[in-house]
Amino acid sequence: MKSKQRILIAVASFLVATAIALFFYIDPNVYPFFPKCPFLVITGFKCPGCGSQRAIHQLLHFNISGAFSHNPLVVIYGPYILLGLYIEYWGGKNKFPKMQSLFFGKIAALVILIMIMGFWIARNIF
C-alpha cells in the first residue's frame, strides 16, 4: 500500500472516529451544535434524512426504537450500508461475488430510490 493511501485511510479513520464520538456524546435533541436540515427550514417539509442525526445518536446508545422514531431509514438501511462497506472494502467481493450484483446493481439502486422517494412523500402526508 502506498504512503498516500495510508495517509488517506488514517485521515478518514480519524474523521469517522471523531464523528462517532461527537454523535455518541452530544445529543442533537439537547444541544444545537448540529445543523438543522435546510430543506425543512426553507419548506417546512421533512426530507428523507430529517432526524438522521438524532437516530444515529440513539443507535450508538443501542436504542433502536428511539432511532426508528426519529428516522426509520437510518435503522433499515444501516445494515445495508454496512454490507456494502464489507463487500467493497473488507474482502466481501471475494467471498460473495454474486451478492454485489444482487444488492448493489442497477435494479437494487432503482428499488432503493423508489423506497426513499416513497418514504419522503409518506412522511410528509401522514
Image: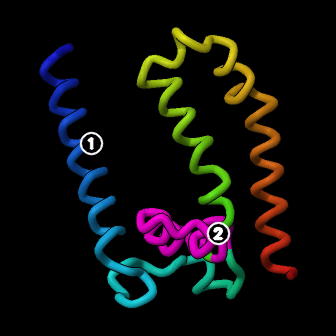
Residue 79 is situated, as x and y percent measured from the top left of the image, at 59, 44
Residue 4 is situated, as x and y percent measured from the top left of the image, at 16, 24
**Tag 1 residue:** 12
The disc, 1 or 2, on the residue closer to the chain's N-terminal end is 1
The residue closer to the viewer here, 12 or 65, is 65
Residue 62 colored in magenta in the image: yes
According to the image, what is the colour scheme of the structure? rainbow
**In the rendered view, would you say 38 is above or below 119?**
below
| Label 1: how many Cα within 10 Å (few below 14, some 14–19, many 20+) | few
Q: Which numbered marker is on residue 85?
A: none
Question: Number of labelled discs?
Answer: 2
Residue 97 is situated, as x and y percent measured from the top left of the image, at 62, 11
Q: Quadrant of residue 83?
A: top right
- Left or right of 99: which side holds 94? left
Give the CA separation, mark 1 to mark 2.
Answer: 27 Å
Q: Which of the image's four quarters has the C terminus?
A: bottom right
- Left or right of 74: which side holds 45? right
The residue closer to the viewer here, 120 or 59, is 59
Residue at horizontal 62%, vertical 41%?
80
**Tag 2 residue:** 68
Residue at horizontal 58%, vertical 66%?
64
Q: Secondary structure at mark 2?
A: helix
Name the magenta segment's main secondary structure: helix
- Left or right of 90: which side holds 12? left
Q: Which residues are magenta?
A: 47-69
Q: Amino acid at mark 2?
A: Phe
Q: Secondary structure at mark 1?
A: helix
